[in-house]
Amino acid sequence: MACSSFVKLNSLSSQWIGQQSFNQRPGSSSRLATRRVSVVRAGSYADELIQTAKSVASPGRGILAIDESNATCGKRLASIGLDNTETNRQAYRQLLLTTPGLGEYISGAILFEETLYQSTTDGKKFVDCLRDENIVPGIKVDKGLVPLPGSNNESWCQGLDGLASRSAEYYKQGARFAKWRTVVSIPCGPSALALKEAAWGLARYAAISQDNGLVPIVEPEILLDGDHPIERTLEVAERVWAEVFYYLAENNVMFEGILLKPSMVTPGAEHKEKASPQTIAKYTLTMLKRRVPPAVPGIMFLSGGQSEMEATLNLNAMNQSPNPWHVSFSYARALQNTVLKTWQGHPENVEAAQKALLVRAKANSLAQLGRYSADGESDDAKKGMFVKGYTY
């Protein structure tokens, strides 16, 4: 599988110059016959998509992911004793999105649909709060994971039905990039069926997003679940990204107008030996250099249950030497954990919680520049957040 996927990926160069074939006619010499040209395109939004991607992938900045579904946001609120109501969700997201100076470290924010249409208690649209800080608004567009029939107890991501019309509405509301998360489980195989379904779904979503003015974040998350070594993760990651880029090209997706949200290449969370940031950086960059074209402007890593400090240390290690892409972050829990614990749902704690967010955002900004030091990190920042079988 890995070998065939690699061949697929490396056969794509013909797409950029048109497709040609040599046809042999009876009684004649070989001649060059030109077939229909396959054009990489992104409709009328091409220039805007490239500019949006560059803005998100700007030096020293990354993405704040606050696109948790209402159910998952409810779990976060429950951890500090709050009920899962729209008022409480709005209050928490207002805390995050109105943090003064956030745009210095954050270039994009992924929102849940509810948040995209919400305003502050003073009536200012959240989208406008982001724009005032030079932060690009983004939107989660997938409809979640469901069981994949015929697989090894694996999942597929739904949401393609109606995606074009929804994306057009999200664009009108101010969103300029999109996110679609599917997952791959190493303990479950992964099966060839699950890999193909994940890659094809991501590619169709990406093409539809670009056609409606949204930069697609391509996210096949390789779950941390399992006791496998880091070498096994690398093997699976290479297979996954070979399939993904094959189908992205098949769907004429413009690589300059996408962003990636990969998992870092780490051992399984239950593996007996923990890898150092330097080892994780080495394996992760090996995978990227083998599979990701330099045309892609930004690699925005997910944290996937790592502690706040681990996620920052690993990102910092990857930026100790130049990369062909902007290597940065798109963190949810690794930016929000300390913020929630500081806030506790009390209005008098909002300012302190916003300062906590800036501390984490600045730490990851420094890591994107390769200048982070873990000196002085709090105990909370060192606590792992992996949950076996975690659902969003």
Image (cartoon, rainbow, N blue to C red):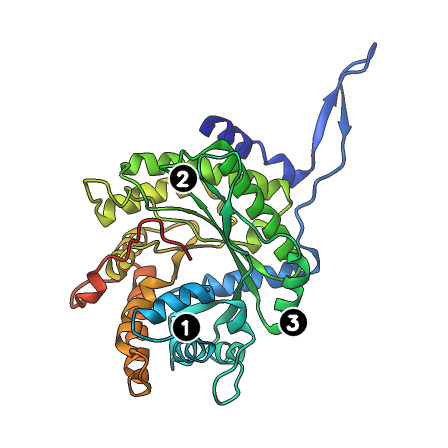
Q: Of the residues shown, which amino acid type is indicated by label 3?
A: Lys
Q: Nearer the viewer, residue 194 or 364?
A: 194
> Which residue, given by chain and number where applicable, does mark 2 sit on?
237
Q: CA distance from mark 1 to mark 2?
A: 36 Å
- Label of residue 84 in the image: 1
CB contact under 8 Å: marks 1 and 2: no
- Label of residue 172 in the image: 3
Q: Which mark is in front, 3 or 1? A: 1
Which quarter shows the C terminus? bottom left
Q: Residue at x 33, y 66 (%)?
A: 335
Displayed quadrant of residue 12 = top right
Q: Residue at x 40, y 33 (%)?
A: 189
First reached walking from the N terminus: tag 3 or tag 1: 1
Q: Of the residues shown, which amino acid type is indicated by label 2?
A: Ala
Residue 70: image x %, image y %? 46, 67
Looking at the image, can residue 280 be seen? yes
